[in-house]
Image (cartoon, coloured by chain):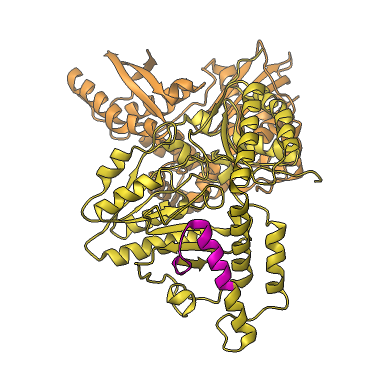
Chain colours: A yellow, B orange
Amino acid sequence: MDKIVYLDNNATTAVAPEVFEAMKPFLTFRYGNPSSIHSFGGKVRTDVDRARGQVAALLGALPEEIVFTGCGSESDNTAIMAALELAGPLKRHLVTTKVEHEAVIQVGHWLTDKGYEVTEVGVDSRGALDLDELASAIREDTALVSVMWANNETGVLYPVEKIAEMVREKGAFFHTDAVQVAGKMPVDLSRVPVDFLALSGHKLHAPKGVGVLYVRKEINLPPLLHGGHQEDGRRAGTENVAGIIGLGAAAELAMSDMEEVAARERRLRDKLESGIVAGCKDVRINGADRLPNTLNVSFEYVEGESILLMLDDLGICASSGSACTSGSLDPSHVLQAMNVPHSAAHGSIRFSLSRYTTDEEIDYVIEHMPAIINRLRKISPFVPFE
Amino acid sequence: MWDYTDKVMDHFRNPKNVGFIKDPDGVGEVGSMACGDALRLMFKLDEQGRIVDVKFQTFGCGSAIATSSALTEMIMGKTLEEAEKYTNQDIVDYLGGLPDQKIHCSVMGREALEAAIENYRNGTVGQRKLEGRVVCVCFGVTENTIREVVRQNGLKTAEEVTNFTKAGGGCGGCVPEIEQIIAEVRSESELRSGGEQQESEKNAESGKPSGMTNLQKMKLIVKTIEEDIIPELRKHGGDLELVDIFGNKVLVELKGACTDCGMTRFTLQTIVEHKLKEKVSADLEVMEA
């Protein structure tokens, strides 16, 4: 396959060339262990700490509030477990939402089996949370509230600033999964009282295998991984140095032109959206108040995997909330929580753009989409035969 | 990424016999939009009773479209007696294999063919006839169907049953029951006692309350709809309202996602009617208001 139009950036992104350049020495001749006493290794610690500073700057945080982890899921898991431990044995209740990433939802299910109580707050058809409902779900024995900053499937943004204030007043810990927001939208934790925040390197043009858990400085984080003094005793395991350096460079890159990139992504996303709406009948856009790079669109009467396979033949990469693409038999839990009818959920496609998406690529998708949908609709028994 | 064979991809990219026959001899419909795949199969016979024309329409994933296309190619020119001998495994073999989680696509093909032949022979509505008790309410799979796939294919786990029939793949509430059915079928096949007939008779009479007054029956209908049927429909974004009951006829209105669905009759038959027959009385008939 020659041509690749990559519109699946909420799944993963390309490593930016400047990120790769920054990493190269640490994959070749600067291979020292930052924990070593000798200066060959010890110097690497300085580089790791510089990266820590770059990530802290992206989040409006202090360097000591940044803990490097292996991935976003590890960060989510660590935050939840830590909050439960810190809250003490009498607080055995968690509040989260029905649209969280699996790395939060599944931890909740696991905790439910262990005897904890988890309240999952629902969303409306636009994907928005009812803040009053969220507030009333928080109880005396609530240890933690966990609400994502932006949804990975729909791009819907959540008012984390307001939620963080509210949770703080009620005396619970607050964690936010910011994997889809970090690097795409401004985040300033000096103004937003979150206790924990998770991000993942490979969603912002750093490599896979590195994540961050932000931990507010007043909190003494109990580690999830024991066995070493790394990250100030907060996460054992020799640092993924190259990955950390890459994430630092990616954070700096994101900050250098965030507004400009977001504006361009928004323009291209809106162009894709209106192009698809104009070219294909019977479509619906899932989610309002979204990230600038995400478009989740349902094509009625057809099924998502079929659409993806046809897009794939053209070199276009996207993803779907259809049941068939996941290997499960139910469509996306996010679209179900939004009460998107099954017929539309099975035919949902997510396009997610990046700083590298071009006008030509968007035009290419707009040009080919109607033929794909028409072809599948001709096969579908739900379209009246002409 | 699924590991589809070249033959699957070829049938997906260039499906054979897509379309509609205006005056078919047999029509079969299975699946529903809510389930994520659905297939309509139609055929026309010549004077010798051979299939001279066959067309399909499929809503579903790549392998659902490919198995439909392959099936039409396989049965073209065959008599119904020849065509009905094909098993879902024959369709899988014809395509050079399917991923485990996609085996149910081939089962859907065989069921559509069965329904179409049934429609030709008996003039039934052309939808898969459900016999026995519904075990998986999410996907409308009966105990008989599960027993059949377990027996025919020597299945050992509930996961395999899900791959074949989808049963257990929705809310998962029936998985323990599927496991029990597997255990029963396997012990039966070990005994080889030939007790299949008894068993299907047993299914037909699965402990329904009898000798109820009209009022008791109505109350039980309302209770079954409220407690067993509506929660299942709601899981899939659907809903239902009981409009009226007269004699053995239960008049309902499907709401929510069900109204968008092109195969509401299937929902009525698989979920609503079968649940009511199971819990209340076998002679009930459900109609849409």
Identify whether A172 is placed above or below A303. Answer: below
Q: Is residue B192 above or below residue A111?
A: above
Residue B242, magenta (yes or no): no
**Magenta stretch, main secondary structure class:** helix
State the residue at coordinates (36%, 36%). B202
Residue at 22 percent across and 56 percent down: it is A141
In front of the other: B250 or A219: A219
Answer left or right for A203 relative to B190. right
| Residue B87 in view, yes or no | no
Image vertical order of residue B57 relative to residue A337, above or below: above
Whether residue A341 is visible, yes or no, is yes
Q: Nearer the viewer, residue A344 or B93?
A: A344
Residue B64: x and y in percent read 63, 35
**What x and y, as percent, mark residue A202?**
60, 57
Q: Position of residue B89 (x, y in %)?
A: 64, 42
Quick one: quadrant of the C terminus of chain B? top left
Residue B7, position in %: x, y? 76, 41
Q: Nearer the viewer, residue A252 or B51?
A: A252
Left or right relative to B231: residue A136: left
Tell me how many marks there are. Answer: 0
Comparing A5 with A375, the one in front is: A5
Q: Quadrant of residue B131?
A: top left
Looking at the image, the residue that sits furthest to the bottom is: A38
What residue sits 69% from the left and 39% below the top?
Answer: A309
The magenta segment is A48-65
Tell me the quarter of the picture where residue B222 sits. Answer: top left
Is-magenta flag for residue A52? yes
Q: Examine the image and state in which quarter residue B243 appears.
A: top left
